[in-house]
Amino acid sequence: MAGKTLYDKLWESHVVREEADGTCLLYIDRHLMHEVTSPQAFEGLRLAGRKAWRSNSIVANPDHNTPTDHWDRGIEDPISRLQVETLDANIKDFGALVYFPFKHANQGIIHVIGPENGTTLPGMTVVCGDSHTSTHGAFGALAHGIGTSEVEHVLATQTLVAKRSRRMLVKVEGSLSAGVTAKDVALAIIGKIGTAGGTGYAIEFGGSAIRALSMEGRMTLCNMAIEAGARAGLVAPDSKTFAYLDGKRYAPHCDWDRALAYWRTLKSDDDAKFDAVVELDAAKIEPQVTWGTSPEQVLPVGSKVPNPAKEADAQKRAGIERALQYMGLKADTPISEIKIDKVFIGSCTNSRIEDLRAAAKVAKGRKKAASVKQVLVVPGSGQVKRQAEEEGLDKVFTDAGFEWREPGCSMCLAMNADRLAAGERCASTSNRNFEGRQGAGGRTHLVSPEMAAAAAIAGHFVDIRNF
Amino acid sequence: MKPFTQLDGLVCPLDRANVDTDAIIPKQFLKSIKRSGFGPYLFDEWRYADVGEPGMDCTNRPLKKDFVLNQPRYQGAQVLLARDNFGCGSSREHAPWAIEDYGFRVVIAPSFADIFFGNCYKNGILPIVASAEVVDQLFRECAASKGYHLRVDLETQTVRNPAGEWFTFDITPHRKHCLLNGLDEIGLTLQHADEIRAFEEKHRAAQPWLFA
């Protein structure tokens, strides 16, 4: 009999019952929550007179609507404020293991605070009404986004009705070149398999280049599994994972050795069978820049914007034409000649301490280009912010003319006041370059923190390897 | 949840791939704490010439006349015909809420994003995966004849065009049962509460740190 994949091990250890058609009830260990996708779920519970099954599985905080400056003024938009206050009230009524209200010292993006407090652990099932829940797969947890009806279902039953995914192995062997990051690996994978390439799959990332990534890098990579269509991304836990978790507030303490013994079994067996295998050569991955309105519309920084006339498939051609029109780009323009108006460094993809260090290294002793209107640096959490300030990174950014903000989701999706105006072009470390994502009519180019900082200095995209 | 059994509905074609949930319902409308009222803002940026804000009265907003939802021939459509990877991106259930609130009960596409696909079933919407060839044919027929209808029957898992040609689609027995009867899935799951409790005890014994 063939061995098991990590995904199979995680799945099978959480099946409560299975129907004849393969539909399972899957037990959920950790339920992350934010203010946008939870109010209707709590309302549903109340209407049905139900309680939360296990409220100490809940880790919650507001992040999408919270402002990143002038915290003394509170949340000025009344609709945003109501949504955040609704989360406060719901947690008060139903309970939670961890809740950081707006302005709490540890508040931040839910996918940043979960890991940094040790509430995401190997072997867990983790859900959240947020597609970027895939981030937590970096710890060898089965983690994926769910809809609000499912949020209500998990609240009421501690389970999810689900069917097993197919398994894909994305293997990246070799060493990444200097200046090439986990973000570039993620974008290169999406460029290769497409935004629907992982649909129906859980992706395990493996190979020497993945093992060499830090925990922050692995979170960046798993975060973007959903941009490849896969609900879940996974990296097998190893000594880096254990070292990251050791001593964290909610990581096991008296059970540490016992947990460790179990966690070491969480890897795909040597003879495990995957339904699909994709291989990339790490040495060939270059810094990536998206040019269109889907994360799969991505190219190495040294390339030119594609020419639709060269595309034989009519539907793809129309897609390229539509993207170029929205992005205000001419075919065959070198990517390095694209000038930007704004820069956003932050989001659940790239707002952790390592990301900020990398951006600061590029910005140190330099100034943003006069043509660049605004550079936002938004740390992923209060803890990240304090750490960065202890290291003096805030000073590096402000000296360069960048703005140092309070933590939150900010201009990744522009639900708060941080947004692009119509026609503005942004180098962004976030995860989605969809039409209107960063503000109606805004134009987003996805890049790594290093590439974003370099673009802020130069006023246009540059190859970080020659910067 | 509204049950879904069968429907004979006008078809609206949305001829682009990778339609994401940000396009289906832009982020500013996610600030609502309600489940209803999203229909007028469905595809807001493609549908209106101004920038939509939550609570806005849409009756007098300037329209982008070329967009399919604004064309007179597609008014009252209940079947949305789409391309590959429909519903990709964010997990926001506001997307199916907006689709349902607008009046669509069926979406037909060659492929869907996983989270959106699952969210549809929770809201009485039937997402149907059809082959690329079939979808191409439906787009051609829809363009060729005004008032183009499709008859969708969940019990027999069939879709029939006006000429009487038909194709079948897949759905899991569990989803079919819930959709046909408009069942509350939480109520069904809670019938197994004892099994969940038994599992939980075993799980706690094996990994007590998960319950700290």
Image (spheres, coloured by chain):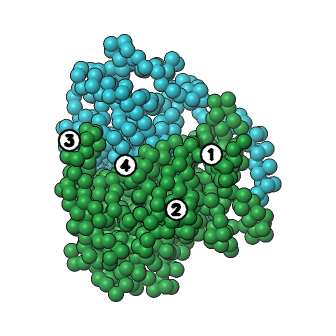
Query: Which residue occupies the extreme top position in the image?
Result: B164
Residue beneath disc 4: B22
Which subunit holds the residue at mark 1?
A
Which chain is in cyan here?
Answer: B
Coordinates of residue A168 in the picture (x, y in percent): 55, 48
**Do tags 3 and 4 sit on the same chain?**
yes
- Residue A310, horizontal then vertical, whole percent: 22, 47
Indicate the position of residue A162 as horizontal and vertical percent values.
60, 40
Residue A37 visible in the shown view: no
Colour displayed for chain A in the image of the structure: green
Task: Nearest to the eye among marks 3 and 1: give it.
Answer: 1
Determine crowd level at label 3: few under 14, some 14-19, many 20+ residues with C-alpha closer than 10 A: some
Give SS at disc 2: strand
Contact (CB < 8 A) between labels 2 and 1?
A: no
- Image mark 3: chain: B
Q: How many marks?
A: 4
Same subunit under labels 1 and 4?
no
Q: Disc 2 designates what residue? A: A173
Q: Which residue is mark 3?
A: B64
